[in-house]
Amino acid sequence: MERKTLYKIAPNEYNKDYQSNVEYAIKLNRWLLKPIGIWPIRSSSKLSNIISFIYSGLCCFIMIFMVVPTCIEIFTGEQSLKSKLEIFGPTNFCAMAIIKYCVFAFRSRKLKVCIDFIIADWREVSNKEERVIMFRNVYIARSLTGVCVTFMFAGGIFYNILLPLLTSNSLSSGNVTIRMLPYRGNYILFDAYVGPFYHMVYLMHCLCAIIMYSVTTVVCSLATKFVMHTCGQCQIVISLLKNLIDGNQNCSRTLDDRLAVVVVRHLRVLRFASHVENILNELCLLEFVGCTINLCLLGYYFITEFENANTLGLITFFLLLVSFTFNIFIFCYVGELLTDHCHQIGEASYMIDWYRLSGRQGRFLIMIIAIANRPINLTAGKMIQWSLMCFTNVIKVAVAYLNIIRKITS
């Protein structure tokens, strides 16, 4: 989507290779989104689009194939409360992943709008300082995404591959082979632990795990990418404000032109941040609820494995616990950054030599300060603002519910 601006950035040495810069900026997000069929930028090839549509259908089918039998097992099985809790954790995680996947599918056009904003911003880089600022924020976003993916899939490998296989080997004796699945369920039409059905179901569970972990990390990576890009644009606006009065070699010649650039760039940042909030607030609410429940249950599983002296189980649930804790921390961290950077624009506006502006020019600065005092925040369902204080509240709530579960099951 091309955006009209009040000024045109001519091609220069800093934006001539903007396409490779965009590729570097969004590559990790595309790697996560495209394999599961929800990358919003469609190919010109009809075959590629058909394949992407088929991927989407298969991903939904695989997740439903996993979550329905586990729900049946929870509501119709005769297990104890502890056994039901063991099944409820993975079921909740899968159900949340399905809802997130559907939200992504319905919001693909709005997601594309945000990516188009990023492409346009890279195309409009006008000097070395702007380029350095944008690359620095891209590096932070890529680093946070990399850590998120590493912990999530490391925990997934232990939970879906090592834990079932090694536990099965330890329980098997003589001619008796004990088979275990990552996600216990009642398949009604066949016995999932017998013959070829076991291998088919186990393969489906592994594929489902890959999809679920991809969806979970995608939400985190997109929030990180979009918010860090917004912070980068805020830093550019702050830099323009610092050079507003006297200018420099990178600025427009007249003060009116420099002021116009500041206003346009600030409005663009606000517009992009508003788009990001509209896309992510529902996903953030799902992440808030899902992570709180998952942290509570993973804490319970970890304590249970500790009491049973199961080293492999301890490692598995510790990795997953760290992963979900880090995920929720990322949302709180980038939410705090977004609020701080919006406030910093107002502070930068106030700290310049504003008394050297004419009355007409000063009115534009007052508008910038007023808007900066009411920043756009990253929220969960427009109800909960992501911040470092929110992170401590999530941990407190998860621990409180963990204590309740411990008392009920003891």
Image (cartoon, helix red, strand yellow):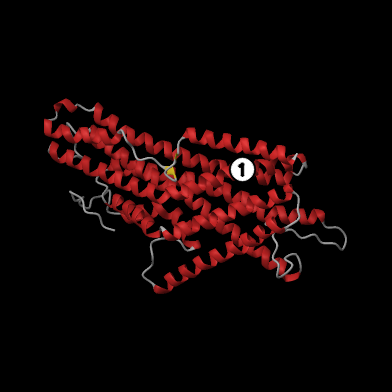
**Which of the 4 quarters of the picture holds residue 302?**
top right
Q: Give residue 21's position: percent from left, percent from top.
A: 35, 52
Q: Give residue 362's position: percent from left, percent from top.
A: 16, 32
User: Which residue shows up at 24% across the image and 46% down it?
Assistant: 126
User: Which residue shows up at 43% across the image and 45% down it?
Assistant: 141
Q: Decide which of 272, 34 is in the foreground and name it.
A: 272
User: Which residue shows up at 23% across the image and 34% down it?
Assistant: 241
**Which of the 4 quarters of the picture holds residue 111?**
bottom left
Q: Decide which of 401, 251 is in the foreground and name it.
A: 401
Q: Residues within 10 Å of mark 1 (few under 14, many from 20)?
A: many
Callout 1 amino acid: Leu
In the image, taking residue 292 as reference, residue 265 lies left or right, namely left
38 versus 21 height, above or below: below
Q: Secondary structure at mark 1?
A: helix
234 versus 164 height, above or below: above
Q: Decide which of 104, 238 is in the foreground and name it.
A: 104
In the image, taking residue 49 as reference, residue 120 lies left or right, namely left
Q: Decide which of 382, 207 is in the foreground and name it.
A: 382
Tell which residue pokes out farthest to the bottom in this image. Answer: 47
Quadrant housing the C terminus: top right
Disc tally is 1
Q: Give residue 368's position: percent from left, percent from top.
A: 24, 36
In the image, taking residue 308 as reference, residue 319 lies left or right, namely left
Report the residue marked by disc 1. 321
